[in-house]
């Protein structure tokens, strides 16, 4: 048999001898890329937890710190989850930071300055978010405006409305106790915001992964023209996506203002980069190259662990910002890698 194998190799020539190692190297590289695309973020997530736990053994790996991370991450997940819905359809929304500020400012100002009950002020804030999202969706999906430019301009408009309602002043009195209880009280040992975020996570996951609407949204993201020709109501579903973002932003505005019991101008701007970073990180988890709600949850927690760990290491704010920006770049590259190997 050995003689026959040698004779066969000799007959095939030197190309055959080099083809096998080359194929092996290629398959090994493809396997490494696949593992990196699908599990790279999870591996990095676990490594970060281990590193910070070893660096701050007395404070990081504790239940109190875990609750703190979850509470801080809850508003971020709500908006990142809503953003995931429009990203699934290959749209962008750069106005949700202003929507958050508008909802927070409207709710607090209506209570403190106009004497509205906290329930009515809460409903008004949510309606404002829905309306802003609907305007974005109409301009983009029905009038054909580019989502990047339209939402960027709409963010400026909404900030102007926010400042008109609040006179661009910090409001820290006149906020009803029932309103502050939303963001300050706890249930079963966890802050109410964590439970609200968990419920929203389940709803958005069910919408995208367990309903026809979600399947149609993914179809729009894959090929909008083919989806339209297949009879999918692409314009309405894109509008619905922006309405979901607007509602999510309003919920975040309510959560952060009820937690602090106050309002300060433009509170939503700090959510813009981390929300995109979380969503893109999520697109490199579980289903590489595809935005998904479970992945976004991991992305939000990843960023929460990073920020908490770096803060515990007493690093300056600019270093934390540099790290978060680097994470977003890495997330985009991992997402592209996932698209290539999937």
Image: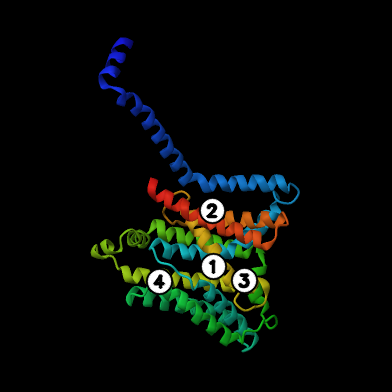
Q: CA distance from mark 4 to mark 1?
A: 15 Å
Q: Which residue is mark 4?
A: 147
Determine which quarter of the picture holds residue 300: bottom right
Vertical placement of residue 184 versus 338, above or below = below
User: What whole-number distance in Å separates the C-alpha atoms at marks 1 and 2?
Assistant: 18 Å
Indicate the position of residue 313 as horizontal and vertical percent values: 72, 54
Q: Which residue is mark 3?
A: 256
Measure the alpha-carbon separation of dots 3 and 1.
15 Å
Does label 3 or label 4 sit earlier along the sequence? 4
The reply to whether dot 2 and dot 3 touch (C-beta < 8 Å) is no
Nearer to us in this view, 83 or 154: 154
Element carrying mark 4: helix
Q: Is residue 261 above or below residue 9?
A: below
State which tag comes first along the sequence, 2 or 3.
Answer: 3
Q: Residue sitting at 66 percent across and 80 percent down?
A: 176
Q: Nearer the viewer, mark 3 or mark 1?
A: 1
**Residue at mark 2 to residue at mark 4: CA–CA distance:** 26 Å
SS at badge 3: helix
Residue bearing the label numbered 2: 298
Give the foreground label among 2 and 4.
4
Q: Hey, which residue is sitting farthest right in the picture?
A: 58
Distance in Å between CA atoms under marks 2 and 3: 21 Å
Quarter residue 184 falls in: bottom right
Q: Is residue 188 visible?
A: no
Q: Secondary structure at mark 1?
A: helix
Give the side of residue 127 with respect to residue 113, left or right. Answer: left
**Residue 258 location in percent, x, y?**
64, 73
């Amino acid at each position: 048999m050995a003689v026959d194998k040698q004779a066969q190799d000799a007959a095939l020539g030197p190309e055959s001898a080099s083809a096998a190692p080359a194929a092996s190297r290629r398959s090994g590289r493809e396997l490494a890329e696949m593992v990196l695309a699908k599990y790279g973020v999870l591996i990095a997530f676990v490594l970060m937890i281990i590193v910070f736990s070893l660096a701050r053994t007395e404070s990081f790996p504790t239940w109190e710190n875990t609750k703190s991370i979850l509470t801080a991450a809850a508003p971020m997940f709500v908006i990142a989850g809503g953003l995931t819905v429009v990203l699934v359809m290959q749209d962008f929304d750069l106005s949700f930071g202003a929507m958050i500020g508008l909802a927070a400012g409207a709710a607090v100002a209506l209570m403190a300055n106009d004497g509205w009950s906290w329930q009515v002020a809460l409903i008004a804030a949510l309606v404002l978010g829905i309306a802003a999202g609907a305007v974005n969706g109409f301009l983009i999906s029905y009038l054909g405006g580019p989502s990047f430019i339209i939402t960027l301009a709409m963010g400026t408009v909404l900030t102007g409305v926010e400042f008109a309602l609040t006179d661009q002043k910090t409001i820290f009195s006149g906020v009803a106790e029932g309103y502050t209880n939303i963001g300050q009280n706890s249930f079963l040992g966890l802050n109410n915001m964590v439970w609200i975020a968990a419920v929203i996570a389940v709803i958005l996951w069910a919408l995208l992964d367990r309903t026809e609407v979600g399947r149609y949204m993914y179809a729009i993201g894959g090929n909008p023209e083919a989806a339209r020709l297949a009879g999918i109501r692409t314009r309405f579903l894109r509008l619905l996506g922006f309405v979901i973002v607007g509602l999510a932003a309003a919920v975040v505005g309510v959560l952060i203002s009820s937690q602090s019991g106050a309002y300060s101008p433009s509170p939503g701007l700090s959510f813009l980069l981390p929300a995109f970073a979380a969503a893109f990180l999520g697109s490199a988890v579980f289903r590489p190259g595809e935005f998904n709600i479970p992945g976004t949850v991991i992305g939000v927690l990843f960023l929460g662990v990073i920020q908490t760990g770096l803060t515990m290491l007493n690093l300056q704010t600019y270093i934390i910002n540099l790290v978060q920006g680097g994470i977003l770049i890495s997330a985009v590259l991992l997402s592209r890698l996932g698209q290539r190997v999937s």
